[in-house]
Amino acid sequence: MAIITVAVTTAQQHKTENLVIVTLDGMRWQEVFNGADEVLTNDSVFNHDRDGIKSKFWADNVEERRKKLFPFLWNTVAQQGQLYGNRKWDNKIDNANPHWFSYPGYNEIFTGYPDTAVNSNDKILNKHENVLEYINKQQGYKGKVAAFSTWDVFPFILNEPRSGVYVNADVDTLSFKTPALQVLNDMQFLTTKPIGVRPDIITYMAAREYLKEYKPKVLYIAFDETDDFAHAGMYDQYLGSAHAEDAMIRDIWNTIQSIPQYRDKTTLLVTVDHGRGDKVKANWQHHGSRIEDAHEIWMAVMGPDTKPLGEVKTSMQWYQKQLAATMAQLLGMKFTANHPVAEPITTVYAK
Ligand SMILES: [Zn+2]
C-alpha cells in the first residue's frame, strides 16, 4: 500500500510529458557565460570582419555581452530555467569520457555510459543502448521519438536500425507529404555546404516542421556549425552560428508554447558534446584529450519541473554521463540498460 502511494505521488509531481533536446557541437562554455572573447574577437587571423562582429556581439560588460550573443539563453532561460557550467562560480559540468570529441561525447550524453572503448568518430553502429531508444520502448512513446542532425554520424551513434528512433541526418531524404518538408528536401540537395554537410538551418526547419506535423513526444536537434567553424579558425563565423542557433532555440520554444500538446508540458535541455581549449588561447580551435581544458562543458534547462534558479552560482560537479538518466527522470522514467547508467542530476527537477 505504501509503495503504491509513493508511486502515485511521484507520477503527480512531474509535469513534463515531452522533451526537446538541442546540442551545439563544440560550443565553449566560455562564450556561453562570458560572450565574445576579447582576445579572439580582436585577432586578425581568426576573423575576416572584426568590426562587424564587434558591432554585433561586443560590450564591455560581461552580462551585456553574453546577452548579445545568446539573447534567448540570457533573457529567457536565465529567468525561467537553469544554466550550469560557469566555472567562475566553481559550477562544473564535465565529460566523464577521456576523449573529448564528438562520438564519445554524444555516446555519453545518450547512453549514460562513458565507455572508454567508444573512441572514434567513425560510422560504427553503437552497441550501447541509449535513452532515446529506451523512451521509444515505453508505453505511449513508441514511434514518438525523433532526431534531426546536421552531422551524418548520428544514425550510427543512436543506432537507428536497432533503436527504432527516427534519425534524419545530412542527406537523408525528407520524404514527407507536407509542402514545407518537401521544400526543405529540395533545399538540402540544392544548397551549398560550407561545412560539408547540410546547413544547421535546414536541420532545424526540418525538425520544426516535423514537430508541427507529427507531434513527437521527444525531439532531438543536433547542430554542428560551431564546431566546424572553430576547427577552420573562423571565430566570426563561429559566433555567427552560435547566435543563429540561439535564435532557433527561441523559435522552437515559441513553437512549443503555441501548441496545446506541448505548452507548459515540455522540458527543453540544451548542451554540448565537448569543450575546446582556452588556457592556451589559440587552442580555442581544437579539442580532444591533448587539449587540457576540452572536457569542460555546460548545460541549460527550462521546463515545468525545473526551478527558475537562472545561472547556478553554487559549487557543484556534474558529469555529462548523468544527462541520460536526467532526461528519463524528467519524463518520470528510470533509464536502465545492459550497461552501468550514471545517476540523474537532481537539481534539474528538485522541488
Ligand atoms: Zn570537432
Image (cartoon, rainbow, N blue to C red):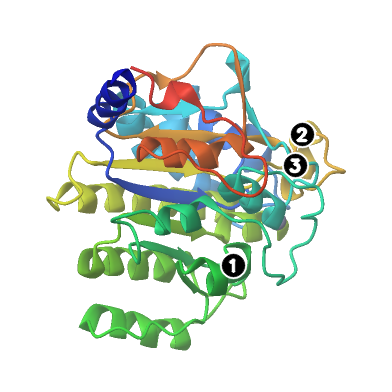
**What is the secondary structure assignment of the residue under circle 1?**
loop
Quadrant of the image for the C terminus? top left
Q: Residue at the location (26% across, 22% down)?
A: 5
The earlier-in-sequence mark between 3 and 2 is 3
Kindly indicate the quadrant of the structure image that contains residue 180. bottom left
**What is the secondary structure assignment of the residue under circle 2?**
loop
Residue that badge 2 annotates: 293
Amino acid type shown at disc 2: Asp
Quadrant of the image for the N terminus? top left
The residue furthest front is 1
How far, Cα to Cα, is label 3 from label 1?
A: 19 Å
Q: Residue at the location (27% across, 47% down)?
A: 253
How far, Cα to Cα, is label 2 from label 1?
A: 30 Å
Q: Residue at the location (17% across, 44% down)?
A: 263
Q: Is residue 37 visible?
A: no
Amino acid type shown at disc 3: Asn
Q: Counting other residues with Cα less than 10 Å from the Cα at mark 3, is it few (<14), some (14-19), or many (20 or more)?
A: many
Q: Is residue 38 visible?
A: yes
Q: Nearer the viewer, residue 240 or 3?
A: 3
Q: Is residue 33 left or right of residue 96?
A: left
- Quick check: is the Cβ at mark 2 less than 8 Å away from ligand 1? no
Q: Counting other residues with Cα less than 10 Å from the Cα at mark 1, is it few (<14), some (14-19), or many (20 or more)?
A: many
How far, Cα to Cα, is label 3 from label 2?
A: 13 Å
**What is the secondary structure assignment of the residue under circle 3?**
loop
Q: Is residue 166 left or right of residue 32?
A: left
Q: Which mark is residue 97?
A: 3
Q: Are marks 2 and 1 in contact (CB under 8 Å)?
A: no
How many dots with numbers?
Answer: 3
**Ligand 1 is found in which quarter of the picture?**
bottom right
Point out residue 120 in the picture as x, y percentages from the top left corner.
79, 61
